[in-house]
Image (cartoon, rainbow, N blue to C red):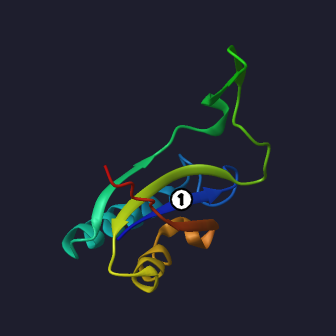
Amino acid sequence: MQYICLIYKNEAAGPQPGSEEFGAYIQAYQEFTQLVQKDGVFEAGDALQPAATATTITNHNGKVETTDGPFAETKEQLGGYYLLDCKDLDEALHYAAKIPSAKHGRIEVRPVMVFDN
């Protein structure tokens, strides 16, 4: 079953680009990605640009509106994701706990809904 691990963290928390700790932080992400690839559960994963680069769109009653910025104003922003193919939720949670941002934010784990054609 596929599970998406949504990575939320305050963009100002944790190691910042240019800091000494940031290199080790990125290395930890590379190692995690290698682990889930080696274990055969990796389906996809990407980091996102900062929340300030987001554009939100609505289409109500045929009227399209765009707003600069993320959908919700929160302390923690969606920063990336991993899509994992795990045997069950317990296995997905096992891997999600190893995502480096779990130390500075939160990882939301949700099963992917599969629609039959």
Residue 68 point in image, percent of width and height: 71, 23
63 relative to 104, above or below: above
Name of the residue lying farthest toward the top: 63
Q: What element carries label 1?
A: strand
* Front residue (pair 20, 44): 44
Quarter where residue 52 is shown = top right
* Vertical comparison of 111 with 12: above or below: below
Look at 38% across and 59% down and name the residue there.
Answer: 83
Camera-side residue of 84 and 48: 84
Measured from the top left, where is residue 54 in percent x and y? 62, 31
Quarter holding the N terminus is: bottom left
Where is residue 26 shown, x and y percent of the image?
42, 58
At 55% from the left edge and 59% from the top edge, which residue is drawn? 7
In the image, taking residue 79 as reference, residue 116 lies left or right, namely left
Residue at horizontal 39 percent and vertical 54 percent from the top: 115
Q: Tell me if 5 is positioned left or right of 39 in this view.
A: right
Q: Identity of the amino acid at label 1?
A: Leu
Count the marks: 1
Q: In which image quadrant can residue 43 be found?
A: bottom left
Q: Residue 101: percent from the left, percent from the top?
A: 55, 65
Q: Mark 1 points at which residue?
A: 6
Q: In which quarter of the image is residue 102?
A: bottom right
Binning the other alpha carbons within 10 Å of mark 1 as few (below 14), some (14 to 19) or many (20 upward) gives many
Residue depicted at x 32% and y 80%: 87
